[in-house]
Image (cartoon, grey):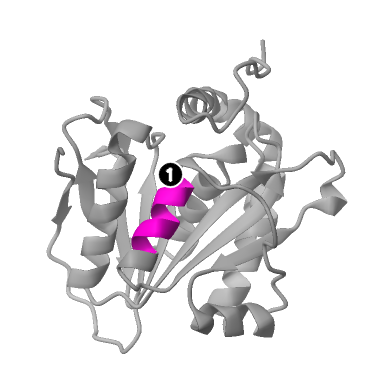
Amino acid sequence: MNEIRISKRINKTKKVSEKILLLGFPGNGLIGTFTISYLISHLQMKLVGDVSHPDLPPTLFIENGEVLGPIRIYRRENLYAIISDIPIFPEIASDFVISIAEFCRRNKINKVIVPSGVDTQSADSKDIKTYGLSTDQSFEKIMYENELPKFIAGSIIGTDAAIITTFRNYKIPLLMMYTTCHPFFPDPEASVIAITSLSKLLKLHVDTSDIQKRIDYLKIQHKNKMQETIDALQSEKQLPSKVPPIYR
């Protein structure tokens, strides 16, 4: 098994009693990517490290003249965020999730929240909803207090299944937040609902007007990332073998 390496930058923050990790990576509708990247920007979280693996494709991003890795760690006080700008392929999914669980253990992170997307048959934006699936009673209480309906039935495979299994084994409370979305196209409309639902749970006020103004632009900007994600999901057999090509 190849080892995932997590590097941390020196960053002084005040100590708090409870720490929460937000985890986002490309999936259905790019919900995880849109949601976590928006919160990182809105909360002005600081980059504190990155995640590397020998089987990751050689990819770098440039932002404001700074070279960034594809999987990064951010922090603001008691809130951590790990975001991946590339799909988590099945070959490294297990290593990736275990490394995140070990990171939580070392940093005494108490809870993990993962926004993700779930396929919907409805084309009406009014039908978009977020559902919660928790592994711990503490999250059940939070869901009840915030009127977050439970994810009742369905099948979960691939990276999401690895996340749920691993955090249950590590006994780290986990909440999967599934927002209904279009699985084959970037869905920033659904991401607005995901951001709003997550912000409510975290007791944060997050203005989503910026993403709402740029919905059409975001759909076009992220079409290549969505195609890469579809390829990864197909390899995990999460999607049928034939899906509509992206904006052909």
Disc 1 target residue: 159
Query: Who's the residue at 81% across and 39% down the image?
Result: 121
Residue in the picture at 69% in, 60% down: 130
Q: How many numbered marks are there?
A: 1
Residue 104 image position (x, y, % from top left) = 27, 68
Q: Quadrant of residue 207?
A: bottom right
- Residue at figure coordinates x 65%, y 29% from the top left: 184
Residue 154 in percent (x, y) is at 66, 51
Whether residue 6 sits left or right of residue 162 in the image: it is: left
Q: Quadrant of the N terminus?
A: top left
Task: Look at label 1 and name its amino acid.
Answer: Thr
Q: Which residues are magenta?
A: 159-167
Can residue 204 be seen in the rendering of this structure?
Answer: no
Which secondary structure is most common in the magenta stretch? Answer: helix
Q: Is residue 11 above or below residue 182?
A: below
Q: Of helix, strand and loop, which one carries label 1?
A: helix
Check if residue 162 falls in the magenta segment. yes
157 or 183, nearer to the observer: 157
Q: Is residue 84 above or below residue 101?
A: above
